[in-house]
Image (cartoon, rainbow, N blue to C red):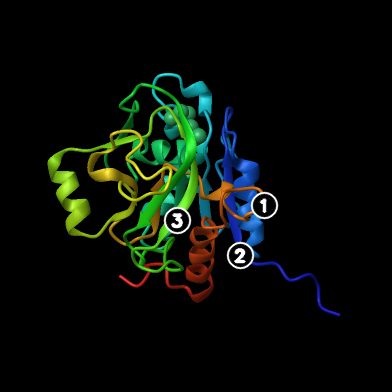
Amino acid sequence: MTGPQTGPRIGVVTFPGTLDDIDAARAVRYTGAEPVALWHADADLRDVEAVVVPGGFSYGDYLRAGAIAAQAPVMRVVVEQARSPHRRLPVLGICNGFQILCEAGLLPGALVRNAELRFICRDQWLRVENTSSVWSTRYEPGAEILIPMKNAEGRYVADDAVMDELEGEGRVLFRYVTEGPQRGATNPNGALRDIAGICSADGRIAALMPHPEHAIDAFTGPSDDGMGIFLSALDAITTGDLAGAR
Ligand SMILES: NC(=O)CC[C@H](N)C(=O)O
């Protein structure tokens, strides 16, 4: 008899104040991969093949959301391995994770206070704009997906040069759907060009403000639309195509 079959190991980082690590780990497990718990003080990623930086209020959002977490020992290693041309670690940031990846310099721009200066919690429609990143190949181009969002600092901003680069290189992954009859079809927070998620030039490092890990089955979430993100990465890891189809 052979031993238990386990899929690729995918790290899920927990900082003091993280909330969504359990759900992110569950989403990873649903794909057939093995979630590996990484603690903020770890200086070793334990041979994981991708890392998810989940949502929450790391270090109480003191200073700015994500600013302190970006300096944590585990992030130093994540940044190093994400930038290494040999290691080419895929990384996904979700909400506070998006804030952390921007603060760490892995993705450009910043997340600032929502235009109405309120915490917003609701189900949100997104349009999938790029289906060739490591984290989005499972979607049809232009697909509209329903994902929960909950944040106070979700408004994506960047200077004009960065915006032009993101648009020119097709690095806008998800946009808020701003028209249509569905509830949640508006730009919730004033994000520039309705941007909800972006990726690196090679599509390996990605982040979004809404929470795909809360939309992995229609029983506990508004949809199972979030699974495509985790399944896309599993495909890329399994086939070794970590530059996506770009
Ligand atoms: N859900 C989250 O990850 C929240 C992120 C951050 N604490 C904010 O409010 O903007």
> Which is nearer the N-term, disc 1 or disc 3?
3
Q: Pointer 2: what residue?
A: 8
Q: Residue at x 45, y 56 (%)?
A: 145
Quarter residue 112 falls in: top left
Please tell me whether residue 237 is drawn above or below residue 15 in the rendered image. Answer: below
Quarter residue 41 falls in: top right
* Residue 209 seen in this snapshot: yes
Mark number displayed over residue 145 = 3
Q: Within 10 Å of the Cα at label 2, are there few (<14), some (14-19), or many (20+) other Cα atoms?
A: some
Q: Position of residue 4 (x, y in %)?
A: 78, 70
Q: CA distance from mark 2 to mark 1?
A: 26 Å
The N terminus lies in quadrant: bottom right
Q: Mark 2 near mark 1, Cβ–Cβ under 8 Å?
A: no
Mark number displayed over residue 126 = none
Please tell me whether residue 238 is drawn above or below residue 159 in the rendered image. Answer: below
Q: CA distance from mark 1 to mark 3?
A: 16 Å
Mark number displayed over residue 219 = 1
Q: Residue at x 49, y 37 (%)?
A: 122
Q: Observer-nearest residue: 146 or 10?
A: 146
Q: Secondary structure at mark 1?
A: loop
Q: Secondary structure at mark 2?
A: loop
Residue type at mark 2 is Pro
Q: Position of residue 64 (x, y in %)?
A: 39, 23
Q: Nearer the viewer, mark 2 or mark 1?
A: 1
Q: Within 10 Å of the Cα at label 1, are there few (<14), some (14-19), or many (20+) other Cα atoms?
A: few
